[in-house]
Image (tube, grey):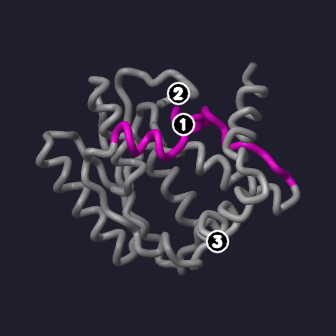
Amino acid sequence: MINLACKIPRQVALACSGGRDSMSALEFLVRGRREVTVAHYNHGTDHGHEAENFVRDFCADRGLSCVVGAFSNGEKPTELAWRQARYAFLSTLGMPVITAHHLGDAVEWWIFSALRGNPNLTPIIRNDIPVLRPFLLTHPNDLHNHFGGYPHIEDPTNSTDEHARNIIRNDLVPTALRVNPGLFTTVKNLYERDNA
């Protein structure tokens, strides 16, 4: 079941990596007859170039508007530098930006922030750009099963422990679910309590 955390405007940009989550979100928006501009950010990695070509070709085949930004500050990139550059790019689009963050991402961030001593929730709305995260209350399986018809491209680093987020996703979340099988419901309830 798709459980939206906020309303989605008629005209939006979608931050689209080409991965399963963002391609499922794109299918959702297109089926909902929204005017979508696909916004892809190339992080300058080998996969980044491959993903950019995939997204460009997909949009060209479907007649979708596509804009691309790229990481180019010349320094050794970090997750923080990539994130800051990506949001700087999204802020130039002049329209609300949708991301495909879902309940699984919310659980990962809650664990990550708790490990740093300040457990908090991913905001549903970031007002400065603005960024909307309407799928934060939707389980990833529901997003993929309802809207998984579009092709996608997998980032090979997702299955490695190269970044902290992957360690949390691949190791900590499965272990936490053994301790609390209702973890996703727990985090969803936190959102519903905070937005009651």
Q: Residue, x 30% and y 38% (percent of image)?
A: 27
Residue 146, image quadrant: top left
Question: Taking 60 as reference, is 74 above or below it?
Answer: below
Residue at mark 3:
167
Pinpoint residue 109: horizontal percent, then vertical percent. Answer: 68, 53
> Which element type, helix, strand or loop, lies under badge 2?
loop
Magenta span: chief secondary structure: loop
Mark 2 closeness class: few <14, some 14–19, many ≥20 residues within 10 Å: some
Q: Quadrant of residue 30?
A: top left
Mark with earlier residue (1, 3): 1
Q: Is residue 16 left or right of residue 132?
A: left
Mark 3–mark 2 contact, CB under 8 Å? no
As shown in the figure, which amino acid type bears the numbered disc 1? Thr
Q: Is residue 79 magenta?
A: no
Q: Position of residue 171 (x, y in %)?
A: 65, 70
Residue type, mark 3 in image:
Ile
Q: CA distance from mark 1 to mark 2?
A: 7 Å
Q: Secondary structure at mark 1?
A: loop
Proximity of marks 1 and 2: CB atoms separated by less than 8 Å = yes
Residue 34 place in picture, x, y as percent? 31, 25
- What's the residue at 69%, 38% (across, down)? 185
Return the mark for residue 4.
Answer: 2
Q: Which residue is mark 1?
A: 138
- The stretch of residues the image draws in magenta is 118-147
